[in-house]
Image (cartoon, helix red, strand yellow):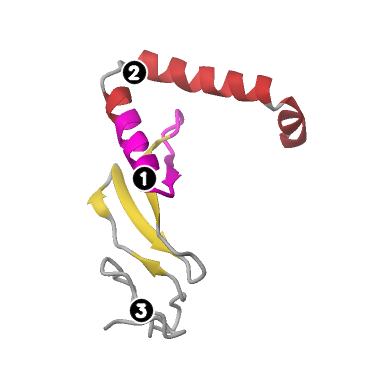
Amino acid sequence: MKVNKDGRECASWCDRDHQGENSGPWCRSGMIGGSPGYAELEQEDYEDSPNLDAWAIGRTPEGNPDSHFLTAESVSEAQRLADFIRAVAQMRKPEIRALAANVEKAAAEAWPEKEAEAS
């Protein structure tokens, strides 16, 4: 049985070396899949279940490396995330860019005070 530094039993998917010098007490999987898109599981000591992070690796319009992730905290959220990614995969690039712009526009309308704070 694999355990972390605090003695908590690790999840079956944990590939972290908890005895290593710089290791944290939480469980983490390795990359599930590979670049430019992969998933990763992580479970902090105080959490009863893991979080799933879906990563997308790309480049900024200037060509610099860029990465983003969305987190799911349940199987239903993970399924919604997978369904969303499949739907976006069927879109053309201009449609995807328009969707991103529409999300930003809606966010600015919904939370205008947050927009002012960020400036």
Mark 2, Cα crowd under 10 Å, few <14 / some 14-19 / many 20+, is: few
Q: Residue at x 43, y 19 (%)?
A: 97
Q: Position of residue 101 (x, y in %)?
A: 52, 19
Q: Give the residue type at disc 3.
A: Glu
The residue tagged 1 is 54
| Distance Cα–Cα, label 3 vs label 2 | 44 Å
Q: Position of residue 78 (x, y in %)?
A: 35, 42
Q: Which residues are magenta?
A: 60-85
Let me know if residue 63 appears in the view.
yes
Helix or strand or loop: what does disc 1 sit on?
Answer: strand
Q: Which residue is mark 3?
A: 9
| CA–CA distance in space, label 2 to label 1 | 20 Å
Foreground pick, 25 / 20: 25
Earlier in the chain: of badge 1 and badge 3, it is 3
> Residue 41 — which label?
none
Report if residue 46 lies within the magenta region: no
Residue at the disc numbered 2:
93
Which mark is in front, 3 or 2?
Answer: 3
**Contact? badges 3 and 2 (CB < 8 Å):** no
Was residue 62 drawn as part of the magenta stretch in this picture? yes
Amino acid on which the number 2 mark rests in the picture: Lys
Q: Is residue 56 visible?
A: no
In this rendering, is residue 30 above or below 98? below
